[in-house]
Amino acid sequence: MFAPFLAIAALLSAPIQDDAYLARAHELHKLYPLIDGHNDLPWAHRNRARYDLDALDIRVHAEGLQTDIPRLRQGGVGAQFWSVYVPVSIQGPDAIKATIEQIDFVYKLSERYPDTFELALTADDVERVFRGGKIASLIGMEGGHSIDNSLETLRMFYRMGARYMTLTHNSNTPWADSATDTPLNNGLSDFGEKVVLEMNRLGMLVDLSHVSPATMKHALRVSKAPVIFSHSGARGVCDHVRNVPDHVLPLVKQNGGVIMVVILESFVSNKARDHRALRTAKQEEFRARDPENAARLLAEWDRDNPRPRATLSEVADHIDHIKQMIGVDHIGIGGDYDGGGGVLGLEDVSTYPKLTAELLRRGYTDEEIGKILGLNVLRVMREAERVARELQSPWRLNSHLRHSHALHGAVIRTSESRNLVLTN
C-alpha cells in the first residue's frame, strides 16, 4: 500500500527522503502500540521529588528527566513498562517496602493523569487502552531481591499488578546468578527454578536482562512460557556482559521470547563500553593513590579523554543482528530512559520515531516494524496468559507438578488445588 510513496521518496534528495521516512514512522506509531520494555521514571522521580507530582509535574517538560507526557506523546509511545526498580543495596523487608512505593507511584500516574495513562494488566488491556488514545501503564519489577526469597511475596506483587520480574539486578540473588557478579549457582538454584515456574503459573513474564548467560540458559530450559529481555542488546554487536550472547539467541527463538533492544551507551557501542571501563579503573586508581585529589584528577582525565558516543545507527545494528540470527519475531524495544539510557539521535522518549525511520530506511517492512514496536510483546504476553490459565487449571496443574516432581526430585504437597506448594 505504501510502496509507491516510498519509491517516490527515494527519488528525492536525502533530506526530503529522511522526512518521508520520519512521516511514515509517525503513522506506524499510530497503527501499532510501541511497547517500551523499561523506563526508570519511578526511581528517577523518587530521587528528584520523592514522588511528589506537584513538585515535579510531568504534564509539562520535566527538566533533568528523559520522560514526561509531552515527550511520550511526541515519541508515539503506546504502552510503557514502568520499572519499579530497587537497588541491590536495599534488601529484605526494606526492599519489599521500596518496591511497593514504586508500584504506588505507577498507580498515581493514572490517578493524576487519567487522560494520558491507564493501568494495563493483560495484552487485551494494552490494545484497548491504546485504541482509546491513552498510554497503557504496565509494571515491571527490576530485581528478584524485591521478593526477599518469598513466593508468597511474589504472588502478592502479581496481584498488585506486576507483570514481569527481572530475576536479578547487578548482584546475585541467593537463587539466581547476575551477569555482573561472581557465580554462585551456575544459573538457578532449586528455589530459582520454583520462582520461574511460579511466575509461569501466575502469568508473570520472566525477564532475563541482567542475568548471567548460565542463568539465561537455565531459565529458558525451565520456563513453560516465553521470556523477555526487557532492556538488553546483542553481544555479537557490543561485547558487554549485560547483552545476550549469540549462543543464547537460538534458545530465545525456540522459547518464543523477545529481546527488547536497549538504548544505553555502553550496552550499544564497544567504544563507549571500553571508555566506561577505563574511566572506572582510573577512578579507582586515583582514589587509591591520592584520595584528596581524586575528583580533580578524574576531572582532568575526563577533559583529556572525552567519552565516545553511541548512535541511533548502532542501536539499529543490534536490531539487524538479532533479525539476522533468529528473525524479526523476537525483537522489541526497551529504552532504559531515566535509568542511564540515551544515545546520539535517541536522547529521550520523544525520539523513538527516528529509530523507526531508520529501520524503514534499512528496508524493514511495515509488518516487521509493527512486530518490533509491540506486536511481538503482545504475542508473548498472550502466550504467558494462556500458559497461566493451563497451569491454574486443577487437572493441568496436578499434571504439571507431577512432571516437575519427575524432573527435579521435588516433594509435592497438595493443599487447595488453586494454591499448591512445592517443598524440597
Image (tube, rainbow, N blue to C red):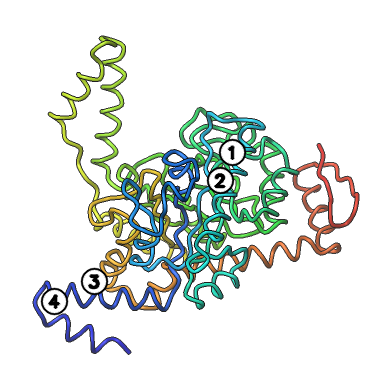
Q: Nearer the viewer, residue 263 or 30?
A: 30
What amino acid is labelled 3 in the image? Arg
Question: CB of mark 1 within 8 Å of CB of mark 3?
Answer: no
Q: Earlier in the sequence, mark 1 or mark 3?
A: 1
Which residue in the structure is indicated by mark 1? Answer: 98
What amino acid is labelled 2 in the image? Gln
Question: Residue 346: horizontal and vertical position, in percent?
Answer: 28, 56
The residue lying furthest to the left in this view is 13
Q: Nearer the viewer, mark 4 or mark 1?
A: 1
What amino acid is labelled 1 in the image? Ala
Question: CB of mark 4 within 8 Å of CB of mark 3?
Answer: no
Q: Quadrant of residue 266?
A: top left
Using a 10 Å C-alpha cutoff, classify the residue at mark 3 as few (fewer than 14 neighbours), some (14 to 19) or many (20 or more): some
Which residue in the structure is indicated by mark 3? Answer: 361
Q: CA distance from mark 2 to mark 1?
A: 6 Å
Which residue in the structure is indicated by mark 4? Answer: 16
Q: Earlier in the sequence, mark 4 or mark 1?
A: 4
Using a 10 Å C-alpha cutoff, classify the residue at mark 2 as few (fewer than 14 neighbours), some (14 to 19) or many (20 or more): many
Q: CA distance from mark 4 to mark 3?
A: 12 Å
Q: Earlier in the sequence, mark 4 or mark 2?
A: 4
Which residue in the structure is indicated by mark 2? Answer: 102
Q: Nearer the viewer, residue 214 or 304?
A: 304
- Secondary element under disc 3, as helix, strand or loop, is helix
Q: Nearer the viewer, mark 4 or mark 3?
A: 4
Using a 10 Å C-alpha cutoff, classify the residue at mark 4 as few (fewer than 14 neighbours), some (14 to 19) or many (20 or more): few
Question: CB of mark 2 within 8 Å of CB of mark 1?
Answer: yes
Question: Residue 224: horizontal and vertical position, in percent?
Answer: 66, 57
In percent of the image, x 30 and y 60: which residue is there? 316
Q: Earlier in the sequence, mark 4 or mark 3?
A: 4
